[in-house]
Image: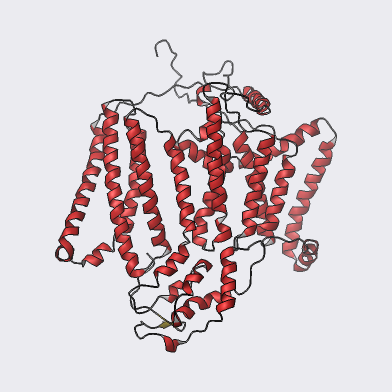
Amino acid sequence: MPGSPMPPYGHRPPPVPSPPVPEAPPWLAAVVLGAGVFTASAATLDPPGLGLVAAGTVCGLAAFVVLLVRPGVPEGGEAPSVPARAGAPAGTPDRSAVHSAAGSSESTDRIRETGPAVGNGRTDLARSRAWAAVYGVMSVLLLSTALFLDASWVLAWTLPASFLLASLAFATRNPAARESAAGLRAGGFAVVRNVGAVPGFLARPVRRASANTKAAPVLATIVITALLLLGFGTLLVLADPVFAEFASRPFRSVSWGGGSMSSIIGGLLSMLATAGAVLAARRRLPSPGRVQRKERAEPARPTWTWTVPLGAVVLLFAMFLAVQAVTLFGGDAYVQRVAGVTYAEYARQGFFQLVAVSFLVMGVVAASVRLVPKRPGRGRMLRNALLGALCLLTLVILASAMARLRLYTDTFGLTPMRASAEAWILLSAAVFALILAAGALNTLGRRAQWLPRVTVALAAAGLLAFAASDPDARIAESHQDLELDTVDTGYLRNLSADALPALLELEGVDRSCAVQSMQNRFEEPDGWASWNLSRHRAHTLLQEHGPFEVDTSEAGTGSAGYRDGCPLPLLDGGGH
């Protein structure tokens, strides 16, 4: 810009100041402590059940109630400005101003929103509350899967997703957490990112109160004494089992959800998560435009630098689908002549590679949207046309992958990996349909900022539908009608309690072999903290139909041998 002074050589842009930590209400520490104590006494992960669901719900409700009493980030205006320090290079924020901004932000937080400050603030407020409700409901539903399902590989997806959606529900009050894909990603980890500020956040009311009273020496003495006893006491307990026996007696009457150490760790983590959720909603990031910085001009890239790679991928996909069409009409004789395998063997392979292709295409689309010029004109229309063709061809490839996967499962049955691949194909197809719709709107000059938010909600709904389909039960049912002489009961016996009703429909030795190992796993009912509907149902069914003993005289003659008294199948599809 003419007349603008050039920055000195080696000058680095000033870092964006850390978001100011708002003031915490004096009673927040007690609420957080209560949530931690409840989690320590109720939650358990071995196995997860009612206690974990109750603990997660209590922590979320505690943070929500705090925000009802003390509202979150005000929706209307922008964050407080951060002026530059006198005598410093342009754009260097004044640290004292940051703290002043924190105070002004806190005073604003005390006022309920009465109307929009600028622009369409009231509409943004309603939209943020709606999306927070969507993410919150999805989070609760995914958390509740621990109450109904026993399959650990399914819970390994639903429980982390529930946490990320809960974090996003609290962080979506901040406009930066819902404006783009990067904002949604930051919102999903907002609770984790704010954990480091939790101790200072909770300690601010104590420091403010102790500054005007003589309570500071008393509090310091209590804290130091507790830390000394905890540190030295832990070492002495570990060093002498007799002393450990006497030291543990006062705590034996306390009922914990799991082991004592794991319960304490779980309680501490829940306290950090509860306070972190409050911070995620109330800690506003400074607006990037308030810190002066030079905007880098978008580099002018020749059209061929991006049309050639995209066009090459589109051409490759078209050639692949043309070969697929020739193979479909050529039949078994054509496949044997060209590839040396039967058509059945050809159709039952390659579906995982095709699923990986769809994942990579999403990365290509994201990179193209970010790097290719976004200005209206022929360039944007050409970019959208190439990406649209790529997405349409990918949808056809996904259909081919699903057909191959169905042929494979019809022969060998479902497994967790095959069931997951099936769900990914359906979810990917829905996401590509959204991308096509967003691209069409973008070509017409309409904005598509809704795409990241809708994609996250769609993924959450898809994961919830996948869990509701009871995957382990579907796996067990898929092995009942296979064209095999012997059912692979050695694999089925390792399924969770979700599969037991389907396994009881087997006959003879297959039924006994598949169910026998579950008798020991679900012989005793769970306690209240680990209570789960699926395991409770399995315990009841085993009491009604058991005991199960293996009688090898009932086995068929088509087995490949025996393992633990149970016949092995002649044809094994593996775990893919």
Q: Tell me where residue 419 appears, x and y as whole percent.
A: 41, 60
Count numbered badges in the picture: 0
Judging from the image, the colouring scheme is secondary structure
Which residue is depicted at the point 45% across and 34% down? Answer: 180
Query: Relative to 203, is 423 above or below?
Result: below
Which residue is depicted at the point 34% across and 52% down? Answer: 356
For the C terminus, the quadrant is bottom left
Q: Nearer the viewer, residue 194 or 415?
A: 415
- Pick out the residue farthest to the bottom: 553
Q: Nearer the viewer, residue 10 or 94?
A: 94
> Going by the image, does 235 lie left or right of 187?
right
Residue 489 falls in image quadrant: bottom left
Q: Tell me where residue 42 appears, x and y as whole percent.
A: 68, 57
> Going by the image, does 501 lie left or right of 349?
right
Q: Tell me where residue 218 appears, x and y as whole percent.
A: 84, 41
> Going by the image, does 476 lie left or right of 281?
left
For the N terminus, the quadrant is top left
The answer to whether residue 15 of the structure is visible from this angle is no
> Going by the image, does 539 lie left or right of 439?
right
Q: Tell me where residue 6 appears, x and y as whole percent.
A: 43, 16
The answer to whether residue 114 of the structure is visible from this angle is yes
Which residue is depicted at the point 48% across and 61% down? Answer: 470
- Pick out the residue farthest to the right: 214
